[in-house]
Image (cartoon, grey):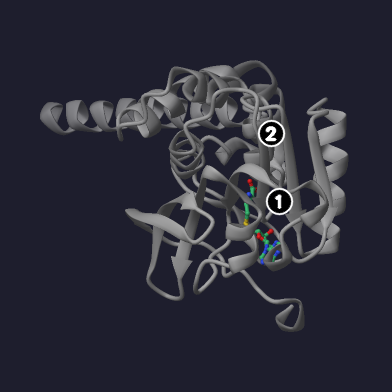
Amino acid sequence: MVKNMKKLRSFILFILVLQFACTDFAFAQKKFKPNSFMKNGWTDKANSMVKFQIEKRGVTNTDVLQVMRTTPRHLFVPPALSAMAYNDYPLPIGDEQTISQPYIVALMTELLSLKGDEKILEIGTGSGYQAAVLSQLVDTVYTIEIVESLANSAKKRLNKLNYNNVIVKHGDGYQGWPAFAPFDAIIVTAAPETIPQALIDQLKIGGKITVPVGNELQELQLITKINENNIKKKSVIPVRFVPMVHPSEK
Ligand code: SAH
């Protein structure tokens, strides 16, 4: 009997502790407001993103790493996803498009070996995040987006955040941007089946293109323009990007 009473008492105590723990957890959850958290805590998240996702995988360019730490990625994703902005994956940005995984943004930026005075062309503005990252490392970024609503919202966002050396255009990236060519470097953030000739033509000799090439199976390639008629190709890693579409396929 006494033994049973003891058992009962421990059981009640166990239930009380459990209930307390649950209320405390619920209370903590209620207190957790993603937006106020992101306002104060995003730099910590960006720092660990750089340390564990980007440096760990071998990106070493200190300017690229610093820009990845200080660019507010949570302001480039839909507000409902802002708490996930610094995680190790791409995120949807509407119109079936995505913002690339942080590591891929850093890697593609590093591959261009930037010095600071370049005129860059980006194909696939999307959220504007890759353009914002690049804009802090070069002279001017020209970026083209085929989905009009995305081009407009990226333009607004980049203006609001004072990335003033990014010029956004709604249009077809397969044509490049002849009015501002030749470019020192080109970054393509949607996957064409083969490298568009117009982009090679609009690249300076010695310039680089970083581009995911392929359909289902894609590889990130680094192209260097050797002279007017020759390019050198290097495969970097397998990747998965949204397709680079033609205006008729939209
Ligand atoms: N760089 C973006 C992510 C790009 S996702 C970022 O930092 O958020 C790829 C983008 O390429 C999509 O927004 C898609 O609409 C765009 N795109 C696809 N085909 C295109 C084309 N032919 N010309 C320009 N943009 C294109």
Crowd class of label 1 (few under 14; some 14 to 19; many from 20; radius 10 Å): many
**What x and y, as percent, mark residue 193?**
50, 74
* Mark carried by residue 132: 2
Q: Secondary structure at mark 2?
A: helix
Does ligand 1 reach within 8 Å of label 2's beta carbon?
yes
**Is the N terminus in the top left, top right, bottom left or bottom right quadrant?**
top left
Mark 1 belongs to which amino acid?
Thr
Residue 25 image position (x, y, % from top left):
50, 29
240 or 248, which lies in front? Answer: 248
**Residue 223 percent location from the top left of the image:** 44, 52
- 138 or 66: nearer the viewer: 138
SS state under label 1: loop
Question: Picture quarter containing residue 42?
Answer: top right
Residue that label 1 marks: 125
Q: Is residue 44 left or right of residue 16?
A: right
Q: Is ligand 1 within 8 Å of the beta carbon of the residue shown at mark 1? A: yes
Residue at screen point 87% across, 51% down: 152
